[in-house]
Image (spheres, helix red, strand yellow):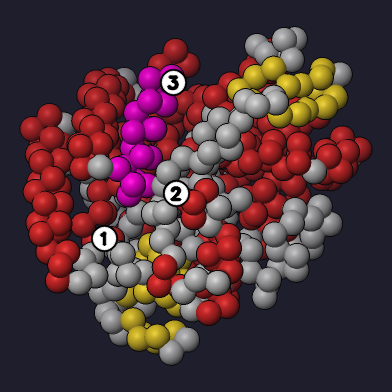
Amino acid sequence: MSSTEEISFFDPEVNRCPYPAYKQLQDEAPVWQDPQTGMYVVTRYDDIREVLMDRETFTNRVGSAAGMTEKAVRPSNPEEAARMDAEAEWERKIKQVYVEEGWETVGTLDALDPPEHGQLRSMFQVAFRPSRIAELDPYVEQLTNKLMDAFIEKGRCEWVAEYAVPVPLYTIGKQMGVPEADMPQIKKWTDAWVQRLGLMQTPEERLWSAKKEVEAQQYFQPIFERLRQHPEDTLLSDVVNKEIPEWGRKLNDNELHSEMMADFFVGGSETTANSIAAGMVALIERPELWERLCEDPEKYIPIFSEEVIRIEGPVQGLLRETSKDVEMHGVKIPAGSIVNVRFAAGNRDERHFPHADQIDLDRQHSKAHLGFGLGEHFCLGAPLARREMYWAFKTLVNRVESMRFVEGANDFEFNASYFLRGIKELHIELTPR
């Protein structure tokens, strides 16, 4: 076994399958300082819970937005100085793009600590009340059937692009009041944003991503202005027009643009799409899971969905920043350090989950995973994500007899990302019922 010093989450092989690295860190270095980034990586379930629940020590100031690169990636030795100078120059160029052509990004809901976090969250909360989720149910059911209509007779599809992505993307678009015809373009913009978040772009690619985000800003700005003049019954209209009482004001343009990408169109679609794709892989690789879903979909689809999120964490990890010196497992973490909590590692921690690397449809407390976060920052859209996954697999059960990978068509490559996990393509054949 190699030394933990040789682990790199930027390595394409580790990116393809990070789970052996997680296990090694859990066993040998549960609090590990990544020599490439300087971040302290936490991998055990109980330790992650401790970090997430202690918001005073482990603050959310660092956030997780694409623009946090300067804080997250730090030089590990003096020889890095020249590289960091070059990086700083590229960051200045990127910032200038927003200043001159669009709107500078600011901290979003995910990057706020109390009390501001709770004050902003309460405004968004109304869109995810049980009654509002129930209102969306017929739309999601209709959408999954419409998407399947397009390929079921030919018995073949590229599952990610033709089904997994559109289900949550079009649903959040429906909530926001964005025309379906515009959603493919919005997907291109969110893809560019996610690539920058992943920390695996070249400087030129990061600049390209920033320009794509500005394109999205230019698309949304006239919508903001129209909704200010003519409010509608949509989530976007509420976000534009509602005042946050404690702030004594509405969100400004910079805040609105930042929320569009980070918390609504990326947060509201990307992770669910990756889970629907991962679920299909699991069902083909383990036919006994498919048989049980078909036998009793109402019982097993919800458990299956939770297990997919747990075992293939669409969000592999996010960041916190220490407000004071702290020690964990004998490792001293200075104040101002970045702590990388790896949810996906904690979700496969055998200390907490028996046979953690297997989907278990009989698992007790299946919602105890960390896939939606924990505490005050528990994912606001979790109820909607669960319904989207329910209908994605319920429609599959209703209309498909069996599935299999198209022979020779899949390389099972994952998108390069330090934080997210999603398979690029998935070519499958289906036999209709």
Give the camera-side residue of 305 and 223: 305
Q: Which amino acid is tagged 2? A: Pro
For image coordinates 21% across by 66% down, the residue present is: 75
Q: Quadrant of the N terminus?
A: bottom right
**Side (left or right) of 51 relative to 101:** right
Q: Amino acid at mark 1?
A: Val
To which quarter of the image does residue 112 belong? bottom left
* Count of numbered labels shown in the rendering: 3
Q: Is residue 95 magenta?
A: no
> What are the residue bounds of the magenta stretch?
183-201
Query: Of the numbered discs in the image, which one, if any, rests on residue 12?
Result: 2
The quadrant where residue 133 appears: top right
Q: CA distance from mark 2 to mark 1?
A: 18 Å
Q: Secondary structure at mark 3?
A: helix
- Point out the tag, 3 or 2, that comes first from the N-terminus: 2
Residue 174, x across and y down, in percent: 50, 24
Secondary element at tag 2: helix
Disc 3 residue crowd, few under 14, some 14–19, many 20+, Cα 10 Å: some
Mark 1 residue element: loop
Task: Name the outermost residue toward the front.
Answer: 1
What residue is drawn where x is 62% and y is 25%? 409
Q: Quadrant of the C terminus?
A: top right
Q: Which residue is mark 1?
A: 73
Q: Is residue 131 visible?
A: no
Tag 3 residue: 183
Q: Which of disc 3 and disc 1 is earlier in sequence?
A: 1
- Percent x, y for residue 363? 79, 60
